[in-house]
Amino acid sequence: MRRVIANPDFRAGFVDMLPAALALMPFGLVCGVGAAAAGASLAGAIGLSAIVFSGAAQILSVQLLAAGAPVAVIVLTCFVAGLRFLIYSAAMAPYLRPLPPRWQKTLAFLLTDQAFAVAVRRFDAGGDARAAGAHFLGSGFALWLFWQFTNVAGYFVGNLIPAAWSLDFAVPLCFIALVAPHFRSSPTIIAALVAGGGVLALASLPMKLNLIVAGVAGILAGTLADFAKEQWTPR
Amino acid sequence: MDAALKLWTVVAIVGVLNYLSRLSFIAIFARRHVPVLLGRAFRYVPAAMLTALVLPMVVAAPPGDPAFASLPKIVAAIVAGVVGFFTRSTLKTLGAGMLTLWALQLAARAIG
């Protein structure tokens, strides 16, 4: 353990995550507030933040729990919202292939939207895969640690934050920061338009089922547009 | 089902599914090629899923408020989107969005 913490690549990774960890503080607070509002015990709130370790899944879980949705619906919704982990996993796989299985299994747990962005940048900078792996461990661990602190802080003192600050709005902003840089190709924009239009049009569906239907429809629309674009592009 | 038991059931199942999703191509399907169609569909998952997650949070007016109450959030979200598109920075996107929202809320209070 001490050897890991003393590793300069681990430390560099930890430091490289600090701006994103800072930006995610309000999101973590909101997750903690949500868990408390849904009636979760402190242990349950920490279970969500430490084990599930995904802001989107945590928010959806506590909202659906509070709405009395069945476990099957909560699990399915969180799985669909977490489909992007499959992509991150596929994109990270070639970088992690030189590392021992024990490292791969640990780093996979720390794979989040922000850790993915930081790790890809570091792996692309080149050098020894082990050093980049230690950097990933540092950045992933930094985010995990900050996430636990902010979630617990939100659980206890979240309701002291004035409503006029609109802290809740930090949650969509964090997702906007992730999605906005993607809008550089027409199929991507079509996928977002279909998903966005669908989720609003189907808002009357119970238990956030509009999220699953619209999300899948958006993915299909983007894929179709991609193939159509390829067909019509002169070679 | 007891509320605490239900929460822990969700933590366990979603926790395992999330971990398996994260581990999928790193370890479980590491030796397989991603099928072409699936690889294509993968590209559009973030745009579709994140947009579907975000829009209801931005557009929905709090219960009891008139529909235009969400207008400041919509404008702030658009500003944040433009900043995010160009800077690719979470911190700058968050800052731009929150500052825009606060400015609009102050202006609305001054006028209203």
Image (cartoon, grey):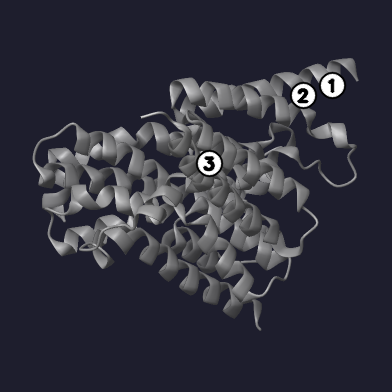
Circles 3 and 2, Cβ within 8 Å, touching? The answer is no
Q: Amino acid at mark 2?
A: Gln
Relative vertical location of residue B6 with respect to residue A204 in this rendering, above or below: below
Task: Please state the horizontal and vertical placement of residue A218, each as a whole percent of the image.
Answer: 59, 48
Residue position marked by numbered label 2 in the rendering: B105
Output the chain of dot 2: B
Relative vertical location of residue A38 with respect to residue A55 in this rendering, above or below: below
Residue plotted at (32% across, 54% down): A89
Residue position marked by numbered label 3 in the rendering: A225
Q: Alpha-carbon distance for marks 1 and 3? A: 44 Å
Q: The residue tagged with tag 1: helix, strand or loop?
A: helix
Relative vertical location of residue A124 with respect to residue A66 in this rendering, above or below: above
Residue position marked by numbered label 1 in the rendering: B109
The quadrant in which residue A170 appears is top right
Q: Alpha-carbon distance for marks 1 and 2? A: 6 Å
Q: The residue tagged with tag 3: helix, strand or loop?
A: helix
